[in-house]
Structures are given as C-alpha cells and as structure tokens.
Amino acid sequence: MKLREHTALTFDDVLLVPNYSEINSRGAVTTATQITPEIQLNIPIISSNMDTVTEAAMAVEMARAGGIGIIHRFLTIDRQVAEVSRVKRAESFRVDDPVTSLPETPLKEAIDQMRERETSGLVVVDGVGKLAGILTHRDLDLADDLSGTVASLMTPLERMVTGKPGISRDEARKLLHQHRIEKLPLLDEDGKLVGLITARDILKARQHPHASKDGRGRLRVGAALGVRHDDLDRAERLLHVGCDLLVVDIAHGHSNLAIDMVRKLAERFPGVQIMAGNVVTPEGVADLAKAGAHSIKVGVGSGSICTTRLVAGSGYPQLSALMECAPAAAKHGVTIVSDGGTRTSGDLTKAIAAGADCAMLGSSLAGTNEAPGASVVRDGRRFKVVRGMASLTANVGRKEVDQGQVADAEWEKVVPEGVEAVVPHRGPVKDILHLLVGGLRSGMTYSGARTLKELQENAEFARITGAGIAESRHHDVDKI
Ligand code: XMP
C-alpha cells in the first residue's frame, strides 16, 4: 500500500492568478486547438459520447460552432452509422453523389425518397446517368395531381442552369444568385451528372466561418466504440461513411482491453484519427499513446452524473489529473481532453491552463435543444434528462440494444456507477457555447494569453480555501 504525499486538487481548489496583459479585447485571442494530427478545432469543446448528449443534431451544431461532437456507442451499428452520415451529409462544398431519380419513377415514390433521404430535391437522370431535369418542392408544393411520373412535374433540362465539374465556389455562387436558383448540377462533357452545388451549402459556409470541416467541406464528427471484437466492424462501417475520429471509450481506459483495441484500430486502419480513454495517470497516457492513440481522455469519476468514486472508491481529482497527465502527453506527442466536471467557463479555462487541449462536456450541454430526448415539464419549468452511461437505466437500455429484450433478472445484476438526473432546458447549444467560449476568452485576457498554449505557459494557480470559494461566488446579496 502506498499513499501519495501531495494533495490532489480540482477546479474549485484553485484560481488562476491574473497576469500582466496587453490584450485589450477578447477578440484578440484565438481558441484554436489541434486535437489530432488532422483535426483542428476552433473552439476547444467536444460534446460527450453520452446517449442524452450527442447524436446527429448535437454533432452538427458542435461542428458548426468550431468544436466536434462524438456520437455515442449505445446504438446498433446501423443506427450509429446513420447518425454519422447525417452529420456528414448536412453540409459540403459540393455533393458528389446527389440523390437522383429516373424520369419514369412515380411521383409518390420520389416524394417518399425525398422524405427518407431528408433532401429538398431530386436530380433526375436517365438510364445512363445523363441529366434530364430536377424535381424540387417548388415543382411539387402547389401541384394538384401527383399521380404521374417525375417527368410530368420536373423542371426539364432545357430550363436548367448547370455548371462544369471544376467550377469554383464563387463562380457557382454567382450563377446561383444570377438565376435565383437553389441547386446547380455539375455535368461532364457528355452531359452526365458528376455533382451538385447548393445555395444552402454556400450560405451555411458563410454563416459558420469557424466550422470544423473536412477536406470536402463536410462537418467533422466523431463516434465512440467499445473494446469488443465487433467494435472493429463498427469502426470499419463508421469510417466508410466518413467518420473523422474514432473514440475508444471505456470507464477504465488504462487497461489491456483499451490498449489492444487502440493498437488494432491503428494497425487495421492506417491514418485513422484515434482518441481513447479514460485515464488519470501519466502511465495511462503513455500506454495509450504508444498503442497509437492521438488524443487521450483524462477523467475518472469527475463527471456530473458519475458515482464511480462513491461506488468503487476509485478516481482522481480532475485538475491534478490534467496537470500530471499533460507532461506525459507532451512527451509522447499526443493531446489530452479534460473529460468530466466542467461546469462553468471558469472550469474550462482552468482545465486548459492545467494542460488540457480541449474539454469534453456532458451535462452542461444535455439541457439544450439539440441533445437527444424531449424536454419534460416539472412545476411549470422545462427540463431535459441526462444520465450517466453507467447508470442503471443506461445499462439496461444497452442490453436491449444488444439482445432485443431485458429479463427482470438483468436489472438486479447491474451495479450502477452513474445516475439519472434532469437539467434545466437551456435552448440552442450555440448560445451555451457562446457563453463558454466568451468566458474562456476573458480568462485568456486575464492571463495575458493570445493562444491556448500561452495560457498554459502563463498560468499560475493559487490554492484557495473554503472561504476563497465562498468569496468567488456571489455573496451577501439575494440573487434575482
Ligand atoms: P460532465 O460533468 O460534463 O461529465 O457531465 C461528462 C462525462 O462523464 C463521464 N460519464 C460517466 N462517468 N459513470 C461515470 O463514472 C457514468 O455513468 C458516466 N457517464 C458519463 C463521461 O466521461 C462523460 O464524458
């Protein structure tokens, strides 16, 4: 038995001592962070791979804001792949495989197809792939007879504007504007359809200039995996639809199972971007890094809905975990993610200052419109549910996914390490991110830091007492 000499600390135990600063505006700082060799984020925030936090809707908004969302793994492979594809199809510079229809397809079938594929129009091509027309809601909305074929209502080729495959974005924008059209099919020399540029995609790119995007202008997204053999098939399917980041996620990431899984992924899918965890020690960081992970999640038991520390007596206060893991990450050329326990923008700032390259957030984002699940009304106020992925209901729900049903005895076998809870409904996630990033920017100016690296270099933490914590909160006033 050993006892560590030093006291391990967490966010509330410290404050950042303000530094001399020549940064007079929050706009003068950058919050960009490189989390893997290929993935740079413009805001250092990742939404948790929890089933009450991240599915496609959350991941889309996270990427638009400059962060990234990780689709949770408690879904069948098909459903997780579908969630990833929805994110990848949400935006792009150009659509390489537009949804198409034949002129002779019945309109009813075409309308079903539009609904299923969540598209506002179908490009109509003949049997050899040559453009024949386009069918959009404008052709359908006011029509009184939908019993014919696509050809009966489509806008035919002779009334369409098209572009060449190599057209620049700006040329495409001009054409779309000049002709007041929404879709520009791209045709090769034989008149065959090779792509599509939409006004909506160009508009989205303008609205979200800091979005996290891949080389084809698609939003970035990650997906979580476990360590079972079929998780390799899951990985293959996820990568096939363009998943940018695989996250090997198990409660105790410093284990042979997690290390083996990372190694297998790195070997089987060369070049794939891998995040893995969770660990709280430099040895854990080193072992996952050596196996091939590019980014390591740090945090055991720090999450708002976690009870691991109570149930298992195991864990490590989050600030010390980051401070101790950061040098190991630097030594092995990997990054670290502070996972769990970030309640405020002040905590986010402290996590980065302590060495994290970004933070993963669960319950702070679970109350937003984009988190999965409906809001519930309690005593006249709206709430959303958040649950630990090791909570009782999540464990049983997972067995449902695996086996299709749950026997009564299954409930009794579970030893939960997380809780089910509610958080206030908080509106769009972009508003929460705006506040978190605004606070981080402010923290950077107090530390005289223009970049997250400078924040880490300049950071000086002071330990505080209970009285210091009380002084930090609003006090001696009645909050309204
Ligand atoms: P926050 O504090 O942001 O933390 O809500 C989110 C992180 O908590 C972890 N997590 C769990 N940890 N039991 C645990 O011990 C659980 O049931 C559980 N569910 C989630 C996870 O790392 C997440 O990102």
Image: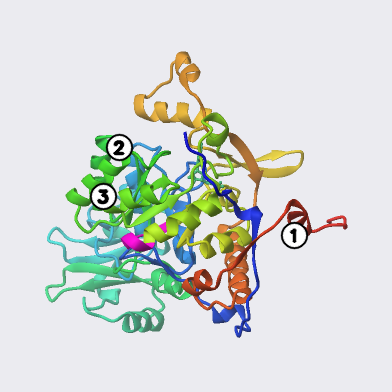
Q: Which residue appears at 31% of the width and 47% of the height?
A: 109
Q: Earlier in the sequence, mark 1 or mark 3?
A: 3
Q: Is residue 462 magenta?
A: no
Cβ–Cβ below 8 Å for labels 1 and 2?
Answer: no
Cβ–Cβ below 8 Å for labels 3 and 2?
Answer: no
- Residue 257 got which mark? 2
**Residue 423 drawn at (x, y percent):** 64, 44
Q: Is residue 332 magenta?
A: yes
- Tell me, what colour scheme is on the image? rainbow
Image: 77 above or below 9 = above
Check mark 1 vs ligand 1: CB closer than 8 Å? yes or no: no
Q: Is residue 321 left or right of residue 269?
A: right
Q: Which residue appears at 76% of the width and 42% of the height?
A: 380
Please state which amino acid type lies under the numbered disc 1: Ser
Which element is circle 2 on?
helix
Q: Which residue is mark 1?
A: 472
State how many labels appear: 3
Viewer-nearest residue: 220 or 43: 43
Which element is circle 3 on?
helix
Highlighted range, magenta: 330-336
Residue 220 visible in the current orientation = no
**Residue 99 drawn at (x, y percent):** 28, 57
**Residue 221 drawn at (x, y percent):** 38, 56
Image: 289 above or below 50 = below
Viewer-nearest residue: 383 or 271: 271
Please state which amino acid type lies under the numbered disc 3: Ala
Image: 161 above or below 258 = below
- Residue 295 got which mark? none
Check mark 3 vs ligand 1: CB closer than 8 Å? yes or no: no
Please state which amino acid type lies under the numbered disc 2: Leu
Q: Which residue is mark 3?
A: 291
